[in-house]
Image (spheres, rainbow, N blue to C red):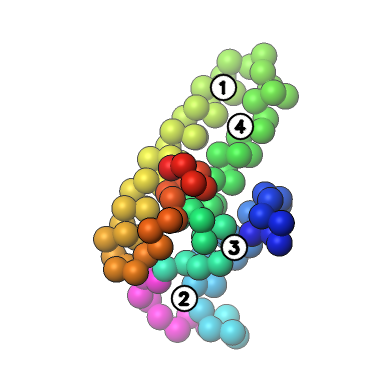
Amino acid sequence: MTGNGKFNSRSRWRSNEILARLRKNQTGQVVTEKHLMPKGGFFDVVSSPHMLFECLMYVSLVPVLSGNTDWLLVTAWVVTNQAQVAHFTHAWYRETFPHYPKARKALIPGIF
């Protein structure tokens, strides 16, 4: 998350970077195969920020492509799919990690 708590392209990159480095040490070598709980950035407020940013990318193009019915259907599919997967991921995290932050939501900070 940026210092001011706003979304930006760096926030998306950082969320993916946190996931990619979760099982690696400082030199980039994989040190564990265990499932670990991601922390930092938008992971402090949602379980799946990478899925949140995917949804935001599609939704942000709706006004530009508003005359394209196919795009609306694709966007609806992506948002529905990502919300469902985020929900299952959130439930798995809560079951797997006893000290999982209770305030952390699945996909939308403070809401879902």
Instruction: Examine the image and state in which quarter residue 2 appears.
Output: bottom right
Instruction: Judge from the rendering whether residue 107 lies leftward or rightward of residue 18; answer left or right.
Output: left
- Mark 4 near mark 3, Cβ–Cβ under 8 Å? no
Question: Can you identify the residue that label 3 sits on?
Answer: 41
Q: CA distance from mark 2 to mark 1?
A: 37 Å
Tell me the mark number nearer the camera, choosing from 2 and 4: 4
Quadrant occupied by the C terminus? top left
Q: CA distance from mark 4 to mark 3?
A: 22 Å
Question: Can you identify the residue that label 4 sits on?
Answer: 59
- Mark 2 near mark 3, Cβ–Cβ under 8 Å? no
Local secondary structure at mark 2: loop
Tell me the mark number nearer the camera, choosing from 1 and 4: 4
Q: Amino acid at mark 3?
A: Gly
Residue segment shown in magenta: 29-36
What secondary structure is the magenta-colored segment mainly? loop
Residue 33 counted in the magenta span? yes
Res 51 seen here = no
